[in-house]
Amino acid sequence: MPIAMSPARSVILILSLGAILSLNGCHSIRRVQPNIFVFLIDALRADRLDQEIGGKPLAPFLHSLRAQSINFERAYAAAPWTMPSLASLWTARYPSQHQVQSFHAVLPASEVTLAEQLKQAGYRTGAFDSNILVNPAAGFAQGFDFYGVWAPATAEETKRIGKTRAPLLHQKLGAWLDKNATVTQTAAASESNPTPLFVYMHYLETHVPFTPPRERVERILDARPNAAEKRAALDGIGWNLLAVPRDQTGIWQSLLEDLYDAEVATIDADLEGLFKELQRRHLLDNAIVVVTSDHGEGWGENAFYGHGRALYEPVIRVPLFFWGTDLAPQSVQTRVSLVDVAPTLLELANASALPEARGRSLTALFRADRYAGWRAQVKRWFGANPTQMWSPIYAELGRDPKGPLGPNLHTCAWIDGDSKIIETSAHGILAFDLSIDPEEKQPLPVTAESVQRQIQAMQRFSDSLSTPIGPDTTRTIDPKVREQMRALDYGDSD
Ligand SMILES: [Zn+2]
């Protein structure tokens, strides 16, 4: 809210600003640092926030929050599974660079993370994580004052409860905020924020095993075909959702997707509750909230289910939107990558940039006032096609034939404008024109000159990322943790 100011006070303010400028230069004038929250919903497909159930959004809270946000409609993960994707989100670098490409990998201490830069800039940093893969032993706690992972402690517990759900994470977050969010963060936080917060929440709701509350499942089934048959199938296993077969056959194939959607609706309601609680604590008076995922999930497109082994659109596209008290809502069509998120947040927080980042701050795409000249220039170069206004998208899975989630179908993908190429493990290159074939069903002839140009561009880019493997990039995994990972479908390959 604007503050009414008397003419005398205005003069004093102008004089003070002048004094600061003359003494210290403009770097001393800092916008009050916003609290930053990253809500990461593991394996949430980009299209799920557009789904409807009975004529209403499947996820009404996130749907509405997205409408009040800067929404990147075409955002891509840098890898199709959790560890490399998260490492890329935090470092703004690609998997070939940070080398987190197997279960045994450790994010090297030499990598600089978003949390480290925010901590350096005075932020208090906390992580509340339910995915066992992104834990401190794997190097993911760099820069966090507090890093909590809550996951079932034993294989038996994993079989019994499946995974940690949002209410427990929110309870832990609440206890941490009680201690760390200072009382001065009141309604006046936009004027003063002595201890800005960076909070990372990692939810597993939309990751197998799907265990949403029964009433949410019922609501989804009511709106879908074959409800009676699906109910009978669930009755047959006594509604023990942990016993649902994950083999994608028969009625279970469609039922698994129903359960996934019930999880989307569940985490949506939990996040609405958290949002209200954060508002009650005045922590959103001056804040940026990022909602995203680490990868999508295949539901049979191109005969691929799950994530981790392919680079098709449903697997690497993710939701990405920035809600902020200071950010005007808008929709951005340009394709962007999760490697661009950390540079954006660091710029918005007036913190130092990541020294070796390959991603770039997205502010150029939404701060029209600051970048009007740049945007006009790009438009002159590329015409009206906004998909070509940014860097090409690169996602990778590695050339290791024994991938962590089973044999890799694909090794890397490149999207320049609407042209996409995927390098496969066994069948050479697949090329698509996403403007006419968004579902990647009609591969283009690889011999076409335009495809050859893209292959060469991808190769050059890929070569530019190669980094020698350092000594601190692998570790031995605790057998107990390995057991828990198996329960989350993180294969058997070591
Ligand atoms: Zn994941």
Image (spheres, helix red, strand yellow):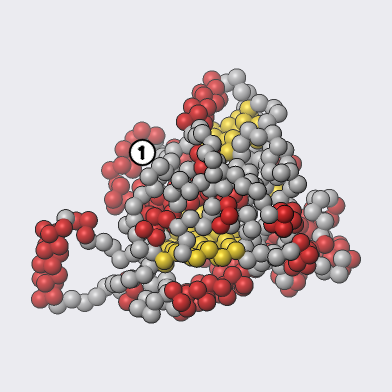
Mark 1, secondary structure of its residue:
helix
Residue 287 lies in quadrant: bottom left
Q: Is residue 239 above or below residue 481?
A: below
Q: Give whichever of 288, 168 is nearer the camera.
A: 168
Residue hosting label 1:
379
Total labels: the figure holds 1
Extreme-right residue of the structure: 236
- On screen, 406 above or below 256? above
Specify whether tag 1 is near ligand 1 (CB below 8 Å). no
Q: Residue at x 38, y 80 (%)?
A: 183
Q: Quadrant of the C terminus?
A: top right
Instruction: Evaluate whether residue 65 shows in this view.
Output: no
Q: Residue at x 61, y 36 (%)?
A: 398
Residue 493: horizontal and vertical position, in percent?
Answer: 73, 43
Q: Residue at x 63, y 44 (%)?
A: 102
Q: Within the image, what quadrant is residue 6 found in?
A: bottom left
How many C-alpha atoms fall within 10 Å of the one at disc 1: few (<14), some, or many (≥20)? some
Query: Which quadrant is the N terminus positioned in?
Result: bottom left
Q: Nearer the viewer, residue 128 or 432?
A: 128
Residue 115 located left or right of residue 395: left
Query: How far from the left and from the top, in percent, is residue 128?
Result: 55, 65
Q: In front: 151, or 374?
A: 151
Q: Is residue 249 left or right of residue 369?
A: right
Amino acid type shown at disc 1: Lys
- Report the residue at 47% width, 61% height from top: 144
Question: Could you say where residue 298 lies in the image, as x and y percent from the top left?
Answer: 68, 48
Is any atom of residue 358 visible in this view? Answer: yes
Q: Quadrant of residue 360?
A: top left
